[in-house]
């Protein structure tokens, strides 16, 4: 029996896929996210599986892979495309390679165009394929950096993905609308960039006029992923917190989700590090939050309780991330950043004091 799970990182809208041979207990994990390494390792442990490989579909620009972290935790091997330029993998994959897990395997198809090293992984019976950013649901990955090329991507999709059976279910690397899968037949007919009678010239014209900004995490993610996510972890990252479901970011701090914070407000110290005019401004504030602007935090942190967990918050999560570092240097151990700040807090519909609609 095949075990299959589709997991999501909400921050980057990245899908991670776990596949395992239930009989043999061997698993592979496709496109794991650094901040979700604890979650993925916990699931693999609960299901009684051993992780044989982490597989990345390409060198990502919008998140850091958890490949190296999971290798340290679980002993898995890192596999990635040979043409992607990454260092530190255990296996470099080329077209036609196979990755066995138990009695099942994934076949490797090179599908460059989004980046030079993109791969699509096809399950042995061709009922499922994992396309990364090469082919998305009714879309595709951009082609304007990391060796991307529109004509190459058009050929990759038509020759390596659209040649699969029509009923083959395609699982993308991302979806920003919450759509989880599609099929070869759907995309052949309905993909507005690559389907129907659209030619390579039509596609190149479309892609050449997207005008998209570069991913926000690109300057961090690409160098990290060229090392398969390897980094030297500070002591804080090696001590697993047990006071909340926090995730350690590649930038070096713990992060926490808005919903959990809202449900546990009475147990927490919420420290808002914005300026006073922001604290009283249109975004409002978290109920019970204490205002300690970042510039005064170091000198006024002594007024905070040492044993009660602290969640830091600002407008978008940048200043509050810096605040966690300052608090840890001051000896506070139970500290986490509210990822996305008040912007994300309000977008999730969480409770606020003050502010405006």
Image (spheres, rainbow, N blue to C red):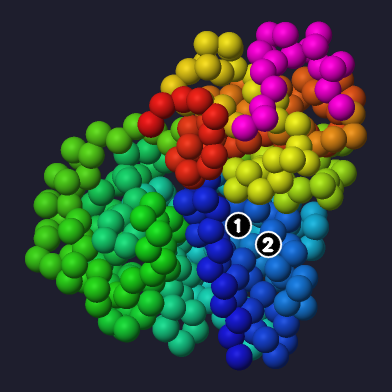
Left or right side of 110 for 82: right
Picture layout, residue 62 above or below residue 292: below
Pick the residue in front: 66 or 327: 327
Q: Residues within 10 Å of mark 2 (few under 14, many from 20)?
A: many
The residue at the point 60 percent across, 57 percent down is 32
**Near-viewer residue (118 or 327):** 327
Say if 349 sits above or below 151 in the image: above
User: What mark, if any, has residue 32 been given in the picture?
Assistant: 1
Residue visible at 84% across and 17% down in the picture: 303
Q: Does the magenta stretch include residue 233?
A: no
Upstream in sequence: badge 2 or badge 1: 1
Query: Image check: 302 left or right of 208?
Result: right
Q: Mark 2 and 1 residues: CB-CB less than 8 Å, in contact?
A: yes
Relative side of 111 to 352, left or right: left
Image mark for residue 253: none
SS category of the residue bearing label 2: helix
Q: In which quarter of the image is the N terminus?
A: bottom right
The quadrant holding residue 186 is: bottom left
Q: In which quarter of the image is residue 197?
A: bottom left
Instruction: Give left or right: position of 190 versus 357.
Output: left
User: Element under label 1?
Assistant: loop
* Position in image of residue 205 (x %, y %): 14, 44
Between 67 and 354, the one lying in front of the other is: 354
Q: Mark 2 points at which residue?
A: 40
Q: Position of residue 285 (x, y in %)?
A: 56, 27
The percent coordinates of residue 316 (x first, y second) are 53, 28
Q: How crowded is mark 1: few (under 14 residues within 10 Å), some or many (20 or more)?
A: many
The boundaries of the magenta stretch are: 287-305
Disc number lying in front (2 or 1): 2
């Amino acid at each position: 029996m095949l075990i299959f799970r589709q997991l999501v990182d909400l921050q980057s809208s990245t899908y991670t896929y776990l596949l395992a041979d239930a009989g043999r207990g061997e698993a592979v994990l496709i496109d794991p996210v650094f901040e979700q390494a604890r979650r993925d390792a916990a699931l693999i442990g609960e299901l009684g599986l051993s992780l044989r490989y982490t597989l990345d579909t390409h060198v990502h620009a919008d998140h850091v892979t958890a490949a190296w972290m999971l290798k340290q935790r679980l002993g898995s091997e890192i596999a990635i495309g040979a043409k992607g330029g990454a260092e530190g993998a255990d296996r470099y994959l080329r077209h036609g390679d196979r990755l066995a897990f138990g009695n099942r395997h994934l076949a490797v198809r090179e599908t460059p165009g989004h980046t030079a090293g993109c791969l699509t992984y096809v399950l042995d019976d061709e009922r499922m394929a994992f396309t990364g950013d090469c082919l998305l649901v009714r879309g595709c990955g951009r082609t304007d950096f990391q060796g991307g090329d529109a004509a190459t991507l058009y050929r990759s999709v038509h020759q390596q993905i659209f040649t699969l059976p029509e009923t083959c279910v395609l699982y993308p690397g991302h979806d920003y609308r919450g759509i989880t899968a599609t099929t070869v037949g759907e995309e052949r007919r309905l993909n507005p960039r690559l389907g129907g009678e659209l030619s390579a010239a039509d596609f190149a014209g479309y892609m050449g006029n997207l005008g998209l900004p570069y991913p926000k995490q690109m300057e961090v993610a690409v160098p990290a992923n060229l090392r398969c996510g390897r980094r030297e972890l500070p002591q804080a990252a090696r001590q697993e917190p047990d006071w909340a479901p926090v995730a350690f970011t590649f930038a070096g701090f713990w992060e926490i989700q808005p919903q959990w914070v809202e449900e546990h407000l009475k147990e927490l110290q919420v420290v808002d590090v914005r300026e006073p005019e922001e604290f009283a401004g249109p975004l409002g504030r978290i109920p019970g939050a204490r205002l300690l602007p970042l510039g005064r935090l170091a000198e006024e942190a002594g007024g905070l309780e040492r044993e009660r967990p602290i969640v830091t918050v600002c407008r978008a999560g940048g200043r509050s991330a810096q605040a966690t570092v300052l608090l840890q240097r001051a000896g506070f151990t139970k500290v986490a950043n509210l990822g996305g700040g008040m912007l994300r807090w309000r977008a999730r519909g969480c409770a606020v004091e003050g502010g405006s609609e």
